[in-house]
Amino acid sequence: MKKFSIVIAGGGSTFTPGIVLMLLDNLDRLPIRQIKFYDNLDSRQKHIADACEIIIKESAPDIKFVSTTDPKEAFTDVDFVMAHIRVGLYAMREQDEKIPLKYGVVGQETCGPGGLAYGMRSIGGVLELIDYMEKYSPDAWMLNYSNPAAIVAEATRKLRPNSKIINICDMPVGIEERMAKSIGLKSRKEMVVRYYGLNHFGWWTDIRDLEGNDLMPQIKAHVAQHGYSLKEEVEDSQHTDASWMDTFSKAKDLYAVDPDTLPNTYLKYYLYPQEAVEHANPEYTRANEVMDGREKHVFGECDKIVANGTAKGSTLEIDEHASYIVDLARAIAYNTHERMLLIVENKGAIANFDETAMVEVPCIVGVNGPEPLVQGEIPRFQKGMMEQQVAVEKLVVEAWAEKSYQKLWQALTLSKTVPNNEEVGTIRLFRT
Ligand code: NAD
Ligand code: G6P
Ligand code: MN
């Protein structure tokens, strides 16, 4: 059986150890001969790489491990690039969140002015990874979850139209796990869903069990009362902080706006922006929570592994909920035709929506990549919201490609999160 070679781009990410542990836990489903780490910041990657080298040696000594900042070494002889880079690091995430909040505007990693600023930084970084992949391993596929995925996806569609990149998000996966648990199922794999939207901006329209029975009424009854909160919390190493718990319970109010569908949690920034601002602490945002929480924990544990020379006793956890990445790699490698939610060019999947928009819809995935499933016509409410948001995302990419300050200003002005042009002017001036 063929064994695969994988490079993780953004080796220094807080998510890298959880992904490595997850890959090691899934070797029977996706055999691996080589794991490489690539990052453009050696000092950060080294902490994670030195620990992961020990983890790999202890549990799968046959796997060759390479950690490098040299693109040629990283991207040569690989089948998959798993990309999760954060251009600008947490320092810039903090600014993305705090600058808008200073003016009473949503301060968020992927939504609103912060998300657009992050997009302007990420586009170049991800295009560079694609170019390395195409130069050194032209047959490889990039599974990208670097954010903001909506803007990155539009940039790759427009600027690298033939590249073998698939953009994917874990939020629907996490929400579906919660839906499944809320009605007593073991896992989301017992459900088949229909869904449409943009990344971090979508709705479920149909959820059935494997026999075809409609599960929507039961799930809706739960969401109407509790949002996506659960009596007993699910094991999900990422979405556990109090701020995430607030987000899951807020889904109740998002659902009330359109009880025909079930909402993605990120819609709270567009439907209740003022509340998001009022609940935020402009001095201590999610970036601070992550730096004080996940980053300290992961880097602390990695340094301990290196000091002890063993991973025994480590509290690093398998990122089980990231196993959708293995599902995606397997779908391509073994032509499994797995049905997955992916961010793809619309091309009629949503009948009454821009054909060139990058939308998030269920796809069948095989050796040729994703084949989107038609979701038909969408209602006026969602269509109106999506048209506004997709225009924002396309304007950001045009602003980047054309170096147009004007278009970025238009994108900011058009974002539903920005109440009026005055705030935009202030943010704009502050940034220059
Ligand atoms: P992090 O800052 O810990 O890690 C990012 C790493 O990328 C850093 O080590 C940094 O040095 C590296 N990097 C930055 N620019 C680079 C470049 N041009 N080339 C190579 N490496 C580069 O961040 P994190 O919190 O672990 O998140 C990583 C990424 O994953 C973010 O983009 C985050 O938004 C994304 N993410 C996406 C999803 C999803 O649903 N799509 C889920 C979780 C995380
Ligand atoms: C969800 C989203 C990701 C986002 C992450 C932020 O998983 O789907 O796109 O990056 O949340 O999580 P964090 O813990 O970094 O705030
Ligand atoms: Mn996401």
Image (cartoon, rainbow, N blue to C red):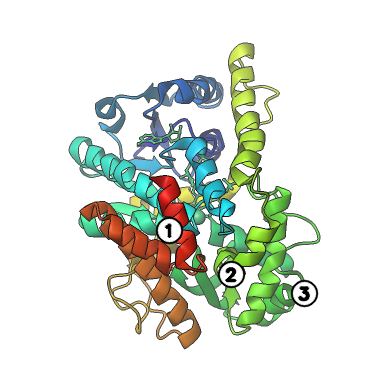
Secondary structure of the residue carrying tag 2 is strand
Q: How many marks?
A: 3
Q: Which residue is mark 3?
A: 225
Q: CA distance from mark 2 to mark 3?
A: 21 Å
Secondary structure of the residue carrying tag 3 is helix
Residue type at mark 3 is: Gln
Look at discs 2 and 3 and give the one toward the viewer. 3
How crowded pointer 1 is (Cα within 10 Å; few <14, some 14-19, many 20+) is rated as some
Towards the viewer: 297 or 392: 392
Badge 1 vs badge 2, beta-carbon distance below 8 Å: no
Residue at the right extreme of this rendering: 231
Towards the viewer: 229 or 412: 412
Q: Which quadrant is the N terminus positioned in?
A: top left
Which is more N-terminal, label 3 or label 1? 3
Task: For residue 317, say whether it is visible.
Answer: no
Q: Which residue is mark 2?
A: 191
Q: Position of residue 80 (x, y in %)?
A: 34, 42
Label annotation for residue 425:
1
Q: Position of residue 375 (x, y in %)?
A: 42, 80
Residue type at mark 2 is: Met
